[in-house]
Image (tube, coloured by chain):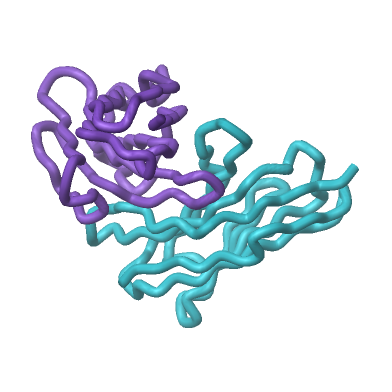
Amino acid sequence: GENVEQHPSTLSVQEGDSAVIKCTYSDSASNYFPWYKQELGKRPQLIIDIRSNVGEKKDQRIAVTLNKTAKHFSLHITETQPEDSAVYFCAASSTSGTYKYIFGTGTRLKVLA
Amino acid sequence: NAGVMQNPRHLVRRRGQEARLRCSPMKGHSHVYWYRQLPEEGLKFMVYLQKENIIDESGMPKERFSAEFPKEGPSILRIQQVVRGDSAAYFCASSPPNLQETQYFGPGTRLLVL
């Protein structure tokens, strides 16, 4: 069935360093890949997304890359700050289906000051 | 434009009781999704609804769970005869008709079954 694997499950970086989170999806029909940030007890918030017709997208310190052939996509956060500490979820969906999201299991990012 | 609203934010039920969770999508959004998040886990899709229609309920348990999105009013996720394993955070999300792939999440309802 549809599945999204996410690694690592936890990640600690020093403030100012970069953080990379990787996801792999199984459904070849997936063509939309959002990333959400969830702080403790809060709602997931969309931070960046990418569609399958592009290989990379950047928004200030955040970038996402997509390799459709390998079914991999990654989130890159540069110059990390303590307020980046949260749980990050990747997801995959198909715009030819019902648009439901299949989420990864999450990465708990801790930025050490 | 107010965001997605959910209520109650916290709900405590005893085993065997019913839980009703409500979700009001963003203004102009006609698609509603429900997800369940168990403690320390990711979000799992439950059901996708449009006004008066269930489009995809492939993630919904076959028994005790039901969902609706009436012509007027919020979407309701109903859990009958709750059990301890139903304790979780339930999030709804909505999306606009012209950008259906982008979902905006509500604050969630945290259900605790005693």
Q: Quadrant of the C terminus of chain A?
A: top right
| Number of marks present in the image shown | 0
Q: Position of residue A56 (x, y in %)?
A: 58, 64
Q: Measured along the vertical axis of the image, is residue B106 above or below residue A105?
A: above
Viewer-proximal residue among A64 and A37: A37
Classify residue B68 as left or right of residue B36: left
Q: Measured along the vertical axis of the image, is residue A64 above or below residue A40?
A: below
- Residue found at x 16% / y 47%: B63
Q: Quadrant of the N terminus of chain A?
A: bottom left
Q: Measured along the vertical axis of the image, is residue B80 above or below residue B40?
A: above
- Residue found at x 54% / y 52%: A89
Q: Position of residue A98 (x, y in %)?
A: 23, 54
Q: Position of residue A55 (x, y in %)?
A: 53, 68
Q: Measured along the vertical axis of the image, is residue B103 above or below residue A104?
A: above
Q: Which chain is purple?
A: B
- Residue found at x 81% / y 42%: A81
Viewer-proximal residue among A33 and A23: A23
Query: Which quadrant holds residue A78?
Result: bottom right
Query: Which quadrant holds residue B1?
Result: top left
Q: Position of residue B6 (x, y in %)?
A: 37, 23
Q: Which chain is cyan?
A: A
